[in-house]
Image (spheres, helix red, strand yellow):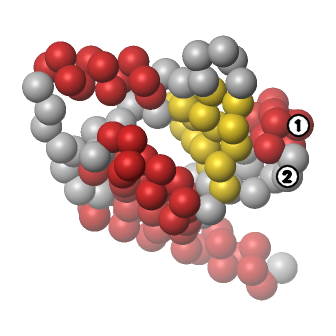
Amino acid sequence: MFFKTLRIVMTPFMLLWEKTTTPKGMVRPAGAQQLVDQQCQNLALYQFRTCPFCIKVRRELSRLSLDVALLDAQKLPLHREALLQGGGRIKVPCLKITDEQGNSQWMYESSAIIQYLHGRFA
């Protein structure tokens, strides 16, 4: 009960902090950004809105100007079930990476996700 109350109290502050501290995105030439946007269509981030590690990943998505689908696995049972079925566990953040053949890789841990995004898009 204590942690639930704490989460309810802290939620607005966490979201405000994210909004005010999110960096501006990098600027790419139009053709390069279009290519990046096309590659991002094969990515999806399963996340909880107020998870500090998810906030960390979303800030990097903004910094790198990546338009990745954000899927709420906390409030939407469909996304929660997809995370469990595909990734094997309900843990966020989780980046789903789908290749050209339709095979999916599920990447957990915010630092691993950020490292992958920097290696691919920075």
> Furthest-bottom residue in view?
2
Callout 2 secondary element:
loop
Q: Which residue is mark 2?
A: 89
What's under tag 2, amino acid-wise? Arg
Distance from disc 1 to disc 2, alpha carbons, whole Å, reads 8 Å
Question: Which sits in the foreground, 60 or 74?
Answer: 60
Neighbor class of circle 1 (other Cα within 10 Å; few <14, some 14-19, many 20+) is few
User: Do we see residue 72 in this rendering?
Assistant: no
The structure residue drawn at horizontal position 59% and vertical position 74%, both measured from the top left corner, is 9
What's under tag 1, amino acid-wise? Gln
Q: Which residue is mark 1?
A: 85
Neighbor class of circle 2 (other Cα within 10 Å; few <14, some 14-19, many 20+) is some
* Left or right relative to 92: residue 100: left
* Left or right relative to 23: residue 2: right
List x then y, in percent, for residue 109.
62, 62
- Please say if 96 is above or below 16: above
